[in-house]
Image (cartoon, grey):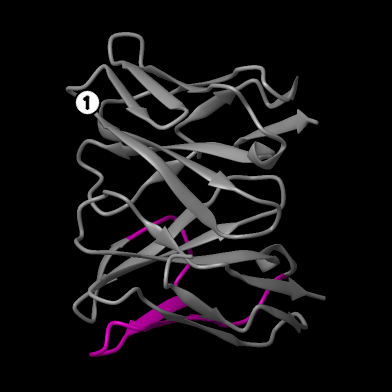
Amino acid sequence: SQQGEEDPQALSIQEGENATMNCSYKTSINNLQWYRQNSGRGLVHLILIRSNEREKHSGRLRVTLDTSKKSSSLLITASRAADTASYFCATDLTGANSKLTFGKGITLSVRP
Amino acid sequence: ETGVTQSPTHLIKTRGQQVTLRCSSQSGHNTVSWYQQALGQGPQFIFQYYREEENGRGNFPPRFSGLQFPNYSSELNVNALELDDSALYLCASSGSVAAGELFFGEGSRLTVL
């Protein structure tokens, strides 16, 4: 079963616009991570936010975490065509050492 | 690039056959995890190896097995292949068993006919 549920499933925006992607989960977590995957390739780690953190920034990325609502959002500002990819949230569940549980992913298309 | 290499990149097998996939972890990483990603889905955890021992397993049958070698490289073996085993198999290395940042290889695309 998949713990993280991303929303929307697909997102299409114009270059220069901001992209917001959401992730909800069901049980308590140690941390939540976002990964990016270009078509058919390996996943690349973007950012990790711990359960006691509310917001983190990395370059054009901003991640928020609301543990009371069991949700996270990933904001990509000033998007570029090169941001076109699938984005996954992954949760490190409390008590489930050693594994990450991934959602089904969001397909982001950035039109030039 | 992450420094995690996987081989082969693509392979085709028939139902009932056996397959071995290989992974070299990033330098300095002692932990390797394997994930299966079906088309259009997120990766599913198969198992993790730490210091040559299995350290956690997902909901996969025993015909999925693995090894880790003293140099921390790893193999994933799948026996009695089924059509549903067709997927991208991803290897990820990390510096510890805690579920922090994972460094993924490019994957091995397995097609079972």
In the image, B2: left or right of B83? left
Task: Give the quadrant of residue B23.
Answer: bottom left
Give the residue pinned by disc 1: A51
Task: Give the quadrant of residue B16.
Answer: bottom right
Q: Measured from the top left, where is residue A108 in percent x and y?
A: 69, 32
User: What SS does tag 1 mark?
Assistant: loop
* Front one among A34 and B50: A34
Identify the residue at image location x=48%, y=65%.
B1
* Front one among A42 and A25: A42
In the image, B58: left or right of B11? left
Q: Measured from the top left, where is residue A18 in percent x and y?
A: 60, 17
* Front one among B94 and B66: B94
Q: Is residue B88 visible?
A: yes
The answer to whether B39 is drawn above or below residue B106 in the figure is above
Chain under numbered label 1? A
The answer to whether A78 is drawn above or below residue A66 in the figure is below
Residue B5 in the magenta stretch? The answer is no
Magenta range is B57-82
Specify few, some or many for label 1: CA neighbours under 10 Å numbering under 14, 14-19, or 20 or more.
Answer: some
Which image quadrant: the C terminus of chain A? top right
Identify the residue at image location x=26%, y=54%.
A98
